[in-house]
Image (tube, helix red, strand yellow):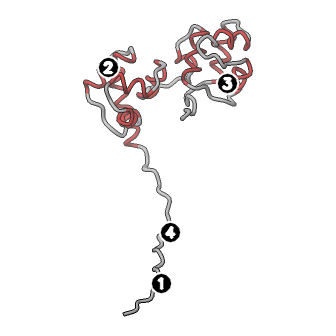
Amino acid sequence: MAGRGVTDFAPVSLLSERTAAQLSREGLAQAASRDEPSLSAAHISLYELGRRTPQLSTLTALARALRVEVRALLVPVDAADLARLRVEAGIRQRDLARMLGLPQARWSRTERGLAAAEAPVLARAADALHRPYEVVARSAVHTRRTALSAPAPRMRQREMTMPRPLLTTYAP
């Protein structure tokens, strides 16, 4: 299943970094095509206009081609959550979960703040993300606190119906 793209992507940042690097859209597409072969100048244009959102692998390829960190192409934030740290490191959720020795579903719940992470898991995550333990632990607390303070999702009301009884005749 294909992902939906990196939600924190900042189109204006891509444009400004490309301009600062003095690259045309075609030049950036060629430079990034070493890692992401199907990238074209038209894709770059759509990303810069905000009409498309790049996948993590494409965003990583663009950052390498521009010689910047992935976070330079993301919307700046005051407090990063666990998913943001993973994206900044350019690691897919499935791969990070594997590095941590966890099922992907478990790490997904942790990233969404639905499950608390234990200190040893956070220490391994810090190593995998190349971040200090304190940053990862603070992000885990921020993620959990945000999830707990969010309003509960409203469930759609469904009309309850009983199945119609089968009409059968009883003959003694």
Asked if 75 appears above or below 69 in the picture, the reply is below
Q: CA distance from mark 4 to mark 2?
A: 49 Å
Q: Are marks 4 and 2 in contact (CB under 8 Å)?
A: no
Q: What amino acid type is highlighted by mark number 2?
A: Glu
Q: What amino acid type is highlighted by mark number 1?
A: Leu
User: Quick one: label 2 or label 3, which is nearer the N terminus?
Assistant: 3
Q: Are marks 4 and 3 in contact (CB under 8 Å)?
A: no
Depth check, mark 1 against mark 4: the one in front is 1
Q: Position of residue 21 (x, y in %)?
A: 66, 6
Q: What amino acid type is highlighted by mark number 3?
A: Tyr
Name the disc covering residue 47, or none: 3
Q: Which residue is mark 2?
A: 134
Q: Which residue is mark 1?
A: 167
Q: CA distance from mark 2 to mark 3?
A: 33 Å
Local SS, label 4? loop
In the image, 70 versus 37, the foreground residue is 37
Depth check, mark 2 against mark 1: the one in front is 1
Q: Position of residue 8 (x, y in %)?
A: 55, 28
Q: Quadrant of the C terminus?
A: bottom left
Q: CA distance from mark 1 to mark 4?
A: 24 Å
Q: Which residue is mark 4?
A: 159
Q: Position of residue 165 (x, y in %)?
A: 45, 80
